[in-house]
Image (cartoon, grey):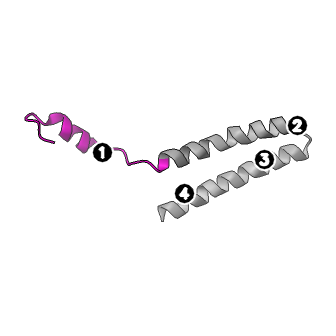
Amino acid sequence: MLNTSRMWLVGGWFATVALIVGWSVAVGASVSTSALLFIICAAPAVVMLILGGGAPAPTVAEILHTANAKDGRR
């Protein structure tokens, strides 16, 4: 269910970006300005997708357990 929600969020983000870029073209902005606007708006969604696919961060208990082992146990 989380993946479905994430995909809806990213899809909504890109739809909003497309709407903003379309509006900038409609009011007469140059193509380079619209492209820059698209890149700036799309960057957070791309970073979120890249980071979201990685391994989950270790918990505090996991970090402390490995730090407190005195006889080489893990």
Which residue in the structure is indicated by mark 4? 6
Give the label on residue 18, or none: none
Give the label on residue 59, or none: 1
Give the residue type that dot 3 points to.
Ile
**Residue 31, horizontal then vertical, whole percent:** 85, 39
Q: Nearer the viewer, residue 50 or 57?
A: 50
Crowding near pointer 1: few (<14 within 10 Å), some, many (20+)? few
- What is the distance, in whole Å, between disc 1 and disc 3 at their CAs? 39 Å
Which residue in the structure is indicated by mark 2? 30
Quarter where residue 64 is shown: top left
Q: Is residue 11 above or below residue 51?
A: below
Q: Residue at x 47, y 51 (%)?
A: 53
Element type at marker 3? helix
Element type at marker 2? loop
**Residue 11, horizontal then vertical, whole percent:** 64, 57
Q: Earlier in the sequence, mark 4 or mark 1?
A: 4
**Residue 24, horizontal then vertical, whole percent:** 84, 43
Q: Earlier in the sequence, mark 2 or mark 3?
A: 3
Circles 2, 3 touching at the beta carbon (< 8 Å)? no
